[in-house]
């Protein structure tokens, strides 16, 4: 007797499954990661102990996770915001970098501004630079339909080269022995910390941006019109909405959010412009938005999960596990999560199959 | 008799080529097929009639192996068919022509036909395809690329695919929905030819008139059950309609009292719109007055879409003028999902598309989603939109459901001008009847209505004035009482003196 297994699409997964599947996915990822570590000659139990300790299981670890979550929440929001108008912003990386670059410029050349003004000026200039960088892709997309995925992606390389030019050249630190660092920023350009922690206030700003973006897109008439334009441009046209204007504004907003991530990372973490100010935060944002299924508030959750994995894998490396293995484990969990998410849309059916044609039995049924 | 028959015991002559017995299939708590029986004999054309949601698609999906039924038995030539296996259905000789044809545009006719078989589309296959095409009465060049074919020809190609595979039982899923009347007539001729050559055809349709025109037998489904299984002879459209929807007064007919025309609410003067290769509208003149339904008859592709969009004020003409005195214009577009709705958004959101900025719904800084939901619940009730929750995505609705969402949104605004393009195309009888009733009701309230439809019966039944559209221009105008069906038909085909 043969069995056949087939996939059927389903409309709504039950609530219990929607919770159970991600949990099982993380467990599966950890299990597969354990196999990888065992093959690499490490004790998986010890290793996972240090991941836990380093990310969520200790006060220091948790604080590191919060710091790491801040840029990830913002870049995830940048991608999810652009999706509201139907555009893919793959340029979070570049927008983050020009945001940090512009903030550095203000920090270095307007250092004479009174302390309480300097920091806001830097952060706003970071947002503005990110917005402009994204708008360079948005305008040709809106007016002549030039693919925004390609343009935002290529603008990343331009941003990196621009930053490199500045930190190796005019903004370079003569005391950095040829490292790719800019001169350090004045003390007034450092983000304050949350009381009693070494976590800068960026995470609070990021959460405020998340709520604001949700409110703007999901709870204002303008956001509604944006979602209509993104959901079906032909219907938006039928309603007389100006789609191109919305595309430009929303992609610029998206760039501003990524630029904000850059300015915060600069003022909260590095305190000078340096190569590697972004550890692929922009690209991680795409993944995070995907994990959150494009939902703005879901991005916050996905970014925290992602930050936990990143910080945990740093902790793993301090115990002697090689960095590639740590990255593999991180990747395994994310692949399992994405697979689980896809699996939720289907169900398996196992049916017994009979020979393709057989003579009818008398009195069937 | 009544009880399930025994296919094994029946003699070969009396037995159907295909016999389905007691097919039952449920989705969640809904019983889509409830012990459905269907028999098709050799050389028979059997119509399968039913409203949207009556279970036609489910039954077809079971027969072609896409669904595994919860219960029931299908035999082909007396042998039990393995259910739930598309491969088994094909081997047994069952093939379906889907509404969307599922062809490869860049392939030639022959390449499309042989795709999925062991043949590779060489000159020999081209000869076979040409021979089978002409035997079925199709005029198809086996070397023509599929993208260059008309809709009617694409359909012939899809049927040819089944013939090439030697399939005996052809299921045509609403084949006439996309065809003009002459194309449909041609299809019917081919169906008769194929049946005479021994093929068995199951023909799914919404159009009652077509059942009498081509089918010899009819099976009518209502709410998942077979309500009639008999010869077409002696059954008129009225009776079929009653069987299909269950009551005699909802037979798709509406009160056709003439309207009382008032002021002009829409005027098009010398309007010209460019199309892809020919002018979509060419020096068009037209007036719509309050309190009248102006029917625009014509075969699709003669400028209907451009006319609708210019009249609704969505596109601007290249030359000429559109004047409208209407404060609110309702537009029921032909392409419902792609032109009037947002598939990924909820029924609630789609119903609010014209109102979300109104004071009752929102402030510039806040949308009261509970008020949007309340509006949605009200409209869902008033227009019988078939959803359980207002948060359902619109893309998950059936054709009738989509049209009800559109009507609810557009007509609840009390518009002065209504532009309805192909408003009943592809709809079940109950939804179509509702559309017609609504148009008449709003006319009586004083709205001007422009009804653009390929369905001549519908135009003649509802209109106070009929215009005939041919190649982007009005080639005939008839007022109620002076309607001449034969002459309108000629004009639609570009015949008859202007």
Image: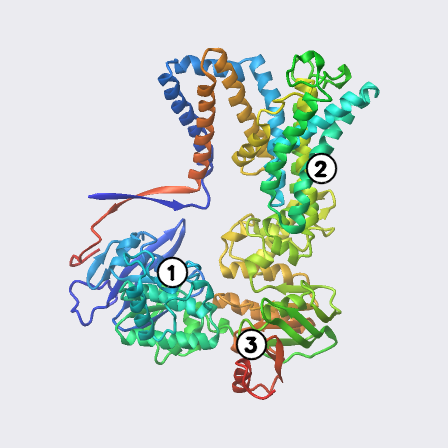
- N-terminal of the two: label 3 or label 1? 1
Q: Nearer the viewer, mark 3 or mark 2?
A: 2
User: Which structural element holds mark 1?
Assistant: loop
Which dot marks residue B224? Answer: 1
Image spot of residue A92 (x, y percent): 62, 33
Output the chain of dot 3.
B
- Whether discs 3 and 1 lie on one chain: the answer is yes
Q: Nearer the viewer, residue B441 or A348?
A: A348
- Whether discs 2 and 1 lie on one chain: the answer is no
**Disc 3 to disc 1, C-alpha distance:** 36 Å
As drawn, B239 above or below B396: below
Read off the residue under disc 3: B298
Q: In the shown orientation, is residue A123 left or right of residue B101?
A: right
Residue A212 visible in the snapshot = no
**What colouring method underlies this structural image?**
rainbow
**Disc 2 to disc 1, C-alpha distance:** 59 Å
Which dot marks residue A132? Answer: 2
């Amino acid at each position: 007797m043969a069995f056949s297994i087939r996939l059927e699409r389903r409309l709504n997964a039950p609530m219990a499954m929607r919770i159970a599947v991600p949990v099982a996915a993380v467990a599966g990822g950890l299990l597969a990661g354990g196999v990888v570590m065992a093959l690499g000659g490490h004790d998986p139990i010890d290793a996972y102990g240090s991941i836990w300790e380093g990310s969520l299981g200790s006060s220091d670890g948790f604080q590191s996770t919060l710091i790491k979550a801040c840029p990830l929440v913002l870049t995830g929001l940048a991608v999810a915001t652009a999706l509201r108008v139907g555009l893919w912003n793959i340029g979070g990386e570049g927008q983050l970098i020009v945001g940090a670059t512009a903030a550095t410029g203000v920090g270095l050349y307007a250092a004479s501004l009174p302390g309480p003004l300097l920091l806001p000026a830097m952060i706003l200039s970071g947002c503005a630079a990110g917005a402009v960088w994204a708008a360079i892709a948005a305008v040709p997309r809106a007016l002549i339909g030039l693919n925004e995925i390609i343009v935002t992606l290529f603008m990343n390389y331009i941003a990196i080269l621009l930053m490199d030019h500045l930190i190796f050249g005019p903004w370079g630190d003569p005391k950095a022995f040829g490292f790719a660092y800019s001169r350090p920023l004045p003390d007034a350009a450092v983000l304050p910390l949350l009381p009693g922690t070494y976590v800068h206030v960026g995470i609070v700003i990021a959460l405020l941006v998340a709520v604001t973006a949700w409110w703007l897109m999901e709870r204002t008439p303008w956001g509604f019109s944006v979602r209509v334009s993104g959901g079906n441009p032909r219907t938006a046209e039928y309603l007389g909405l100006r789609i191109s204007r919305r595309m430009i504004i929303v992609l610029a907003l998206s760039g501003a959010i990524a630029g904000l991530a850059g300015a915060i990372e600069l003022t909260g973490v590095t305190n000078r412009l340096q190569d590697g100010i972004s550890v692929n935060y922009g690209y991680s944002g795409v993944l995070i938005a995907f994990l959150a299924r494009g939902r703005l508030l879901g991005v916050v959750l996905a970014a925290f999960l992602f930050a936990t994995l990143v910080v945990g894998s740093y902790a793993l490396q301090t115990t002697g596990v090689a960095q590639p293995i740590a990255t593999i484990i991180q990747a395994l969990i994310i692949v399992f999560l994405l697979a689980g998410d896809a699996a939720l849309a289907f169900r398996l059916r196992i049916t017994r199959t009979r020979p393709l044609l057989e003579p009818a039995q008398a009195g069937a049924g | 008799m009544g009880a399930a028959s025994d296919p094994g015991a029946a003699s070969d002559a009396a037995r159907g080529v295909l016999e389905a017995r007691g097919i039952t299939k449920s989705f969640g708590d809904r019983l889509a097929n409830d012990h459905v029986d269907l028999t098709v004999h050799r050389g028979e054309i059997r119509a399968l009639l039913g409203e949207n949601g009556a279970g036609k698609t489910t039954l077809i999906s079971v027969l072609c192996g896409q669904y595994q039924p919860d219960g029931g038995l299908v035999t082909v030539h007396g042998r039990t068919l393995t259910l739930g296996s598309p491969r088994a259905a094909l081997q047994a000789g069952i093939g379906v022509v889907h509404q969307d044809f599922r062809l490869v545009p860049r392939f030639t006719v022959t390449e499309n036909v042989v795709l999925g078989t062991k043949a590779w589309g060489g000159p020999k296959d081209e000869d076979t395809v040409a021979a089978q095409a002409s035997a079925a009465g199709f005029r198809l060049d086996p070397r023509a690329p599929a993208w260059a074919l008309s809709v009617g020809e694409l359909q012939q190609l899809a049927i040819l695919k089944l013939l090439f595979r030697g399939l005996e039982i052809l299921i045509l899923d609403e084949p006439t929905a996309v065809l003009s009347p002459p194309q449909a007539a041609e299809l019917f001729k081919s169906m008769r030819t194929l049946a005479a050559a021994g093929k068995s055809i199951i023909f799914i349709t919404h159009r009652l008139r077509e059942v009498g025109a081509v089918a010899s037998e009819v099976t009518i489904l209502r709410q998942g059950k077979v309500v009639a299984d008999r010869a077409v002879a002696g059954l008129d459209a009225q009776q079929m309609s009653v069987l299909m929807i269950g009551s005699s007064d909802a037979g798709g007919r509406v009160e056709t009292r003439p309207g009382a025309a008032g002021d002009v609410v829409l005027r098009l003067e010398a309007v010209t719109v460019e199309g892809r290769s020919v002018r979509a509208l060419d020096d068009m003149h037209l007036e719509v007055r309050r309190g009248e339904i102006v029917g625009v008859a014509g075969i699709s592709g003669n400028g209907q879409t451009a006319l609708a969009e210019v009249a609704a004020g969505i596109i601007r003409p290249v030359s000429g003028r559109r004047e409208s005195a209407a404060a609110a214009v309702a537009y029921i577009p032909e392409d419902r999902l792609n032109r009037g709705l947002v598939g990924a958004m909820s029924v609630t959101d789609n119903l609010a598309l014209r109102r979300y900025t109104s004071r009752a719904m929102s402030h510039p800084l806040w949308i009261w989603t509970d008020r949007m939901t309340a509006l949605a619940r009200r409209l869902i009730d008033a227009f019988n939109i078939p959803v359980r929750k207002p948060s359902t995505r619109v893309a998950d609705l059936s054709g009738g459901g989509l049209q009800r969402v559109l009507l609810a949104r557009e007509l609840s605004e009390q518009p002065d001008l209504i532009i309805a393009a192909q408003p009943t195309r592809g709809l079940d009888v109950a939804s179509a009847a509702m559309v017609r009733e609504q148009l008449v009701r709003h006319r009586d309230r004083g709205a001007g209505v422009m009804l653009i439809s390929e369905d001549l019966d519908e135009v003649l039944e509802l209109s106070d004035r009929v215009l005939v559209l041919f190649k982007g221009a009005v080639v005939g105008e008839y007022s109620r009482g002076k309607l001449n069906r034969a002459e309108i038909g000629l004009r639609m085909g570009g015949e008859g003196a202007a």
